[in-house]
Image: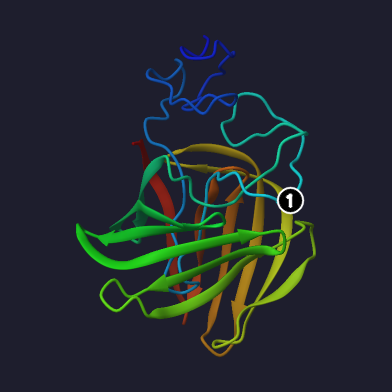
Amino acid sequence: MQCEKCGAPLQQGDRVCLQCGTQVSKPISGKSNTKWILAIASMIIAAAVVGYLAVSNLPSSKQVQKGNPSSVSNNKEVSYMLNPKYTYEFDANGETLTYTFDDEVDDKTNRWEVEYDGDLQYLYQEKESKTGLVSLAVDPETEAEDYRHIDLKYPVEKGLKWISDKESDESAEIVSVSETVKTDAGKFDDCIKVKYVSKSAEIEQYAYYAPNIGCVKMEGKESGERFTYELVDLTEE
């Protein structure tokens, strides 16, 4: 099967054309991947991130793996921000969270409206530069900043460590750069796996970031209670 727009070959399970980004109107036969991608950010790490946005000085990509929308070619830049072309729906421990692109604050910062079961909860911003990816929540009425979180540090490499949240004394470490993650939305290769730990807040969690897709899943424990967040639907605007 080929992309209807650019003619590039598509593989089983593809929902988006790797070459031009066009959404596949009819999934290729095989195991159904009826829903699609991107991840949510829990209040614990200030919502996590992600998709593609063309910004300068981003980290280098990995070798391409065909048949997977999160794969990238070796000569393209990689982003871990949410993609403003889409609206994202996440399952957060049985609750529905929806991210809708609102505005481009500047050439490296995007703002999203975050709804909880249909009600606007806060504005979510992501800023990506050559040093990393930062997310923050903004009050929709006052536009006051509620929190700031360093989701990723660049360049991406296994073993890289940083302080992700000073207020909760949360630390982060990249524990893998080659994870394969499966969610209800699909399969994602070459994912970055990040471990976040805050002893004071009794939090230990893992976030999985797919290249040019973003954080596709989060799981962990808070005060002994397990939680999971993952993308369940992606709609092209």
From the viewer's perspective, is 182 left or right of 91? Answer: right
Image coordinates for residue 207, horizontal then vertical, percent: 57, 60
For residue 60, above or below residue 116: above
In the image, 105 versus 190, the foreground residue is: 105
Q: What's the residue at 79%, 57% (across, down)?
A: 157
Q: Which amino acid does label 1 sit on?
A: Pro
Observer-nearest of 67 and 153? 153
Give the quadrant of the C terminus. Answer: top left
- Spot the residue most to the front: 106
Find residue 18 and report its image quarter.
Answer: top right
Q: Where is residue 14 in the image (x, y as percent from the top left)?
A: 51, 25
Q: Which residue occupies 40% across, 64% down?
A: 124
Q: Name the residue under label 1.
A: 59
Q: Who is closer to the viewer here, 22 or 224? A: 22
SS state under label 1: loop
Q: Quadrant of residue 133?
A: bottom right
Residue 21 in the image: x percent, y percent?
51, 29
Residue in the image at 69% along x and 29% along y? 65
195 relative to 200 in the view: left or right = right
Look at the picture and state if 208 lies above or below 76: below
Q: Which of 8 and 117 is in front in this view?
A: 8
